[in-house]
Amino acid sequence: MPAWIRRLQSHRYGLTLFAFLTAAVFTGAACVAFARAFEVVLNHRLDFHNAGAWCWLITPIVILCAVELIRRTAPYAAGTGIPQAIFASEYLDKAHEKTLFPLVSLWTMTVKIGVILLGIWVGASTGREGPTVHIAVCVFIAVMLVFRRLFGVDFDMRSAAIAGGAAGLAAAFNTPLAGVTFAVEELSENYFSTVKDFVVMAIIVSAVAAKTLTGEYAYFGKLAEPANVPLLVVLLIGLAGGAAGALFSSLLLRGSEWSRRISTGAGRYVWPIVMSLGLLITAVLAGTRVMGPGNKVAQVLLEGQQGSWVVWFPLAKMAATLMTYWSGMAGGIFAPCLSIGAALGSVIGQGMQTSIAACALLGMAAFLSGSIQAPITSFVIIFEMTGHHQMLLPLMLASLLAFMSARLFGAEHLYKALAKQYAPLLKENV
């Protein structure tokens, strides 16, 4: 072994830091490249506006081909990608490295990217944020494996999975603080999971008490006029977001299990076609805005613009997203959840005759929290994306209420429940 490699090995901390930073650079570049490819394909989407009746033929064929590509070449590329990242962050140690490697391989990543681009091209209701987390984990681990091969240092691959997943979420939303909370709340959830609702509630109650005694107070002065959202409206949005999120996550989990059971024999070809036709029917009834990630819908509502379509949008978008996921496609649910929540919040805001934009913002955090059971990540993402400091406390309250009400409705931790499907991989080592 060359002397310079031995010298590097003797500086374990510095070498590990350099490897992680290098992996982070490559991960960030990969996430940006995927985001740009996603936007290019989305801007050339085939729907009823530019493909007409051909959609009834093109969309089922492309989705069926995409699902079969996953099944035949990279079965772990299916779904959002966050469950794969969570499972890797928990079990990717030396004992399970070989059997779990297909979860986070570059081949799995490549198939996932191709399938998502195909799906979004033909109108699948899916986002890129969850898949970006998966892509980031794959790239991060690949770079760490190169360093291990070059320098003979056994890096902790579980830490690499956590770092990659957190970096991926931060890159997907351009929210570095949310990446930190995601790492704590989702990727390394242990003791914190048993106390997070008490911790966050304590923070909120303390802040409300202080605000009641001191009035509107900002440490560096008042930067902007707070949005006028009554407490009752925040409570309603939190509870509604929790109930709707619990329904969505429960349907996604139960439907996924049922889909896997019937996707055998001829069913493996019929089911994706049926789901894609259901997606198209939903688009005919509710408009093509239910296709794609839903970012533009959320943006319109955050600007305070609203039409009669918004009343039906949450249910229609929920149905389109569920059918896309049940088909066996790869794709994320973060962006669809945000658009559903924005619409739900704006409907409540309109009914209570208060700010549509502020209620849409609260609805995004509430529905996301109720769906994925991650209240801190939910309100931090929304806060960082919008930068409305005056809305932080209402966002925290709506997210926590949604989380707690979803639990009362029997909602499971969505990504943890989805990650359980990879448990048989651990038995391969036994």
Image (spheres, rainbow, N blue to C red):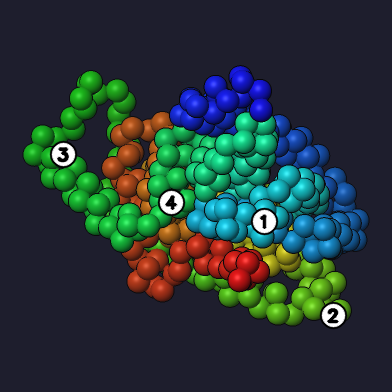
Q: Circle 2: is it few (<14), some (14-19), or many (20+) Cα within 10 Å?
A: few
Image height of 55 relative to 168, above or below: below
Q: Position of residue 109 (x, y in %)?
A: 72, 47
Find disc 4 in the rendering and name its residue. 188
Q: Look at the numbered disc 1 and give the secondary structure of its residue.
A: helix
Instruction: Give the residue type at disc 4.
Output: Ser
**Mark 4 → mark 1, Cα distance in angstroms:** 21 Å
Tell whether label 1 touches label 3 (CB within 8 Å): no
* Quarter of the C terminus within the rendering: bottom right
Tell whether label 3 touches label 2 (CB within 8 Å): no
Q: Earlier in the sequence, mark 4 or mark 1?
A: 1
Q: Position of residue 140 (x, y in %)?
A: 61, 38
Instruction: Give the residue type at disc 2.
Output: Gly
Q: Earlier in the sequence, mark 3 or mark 4?
A: 4
Q: Circle 4: is it few (<14), some (14-19), or many (20+) Cα within 10 Å?
A: some
Q: Look at the numbered disc 3 and give the secondary structure of its residue.
A: helix
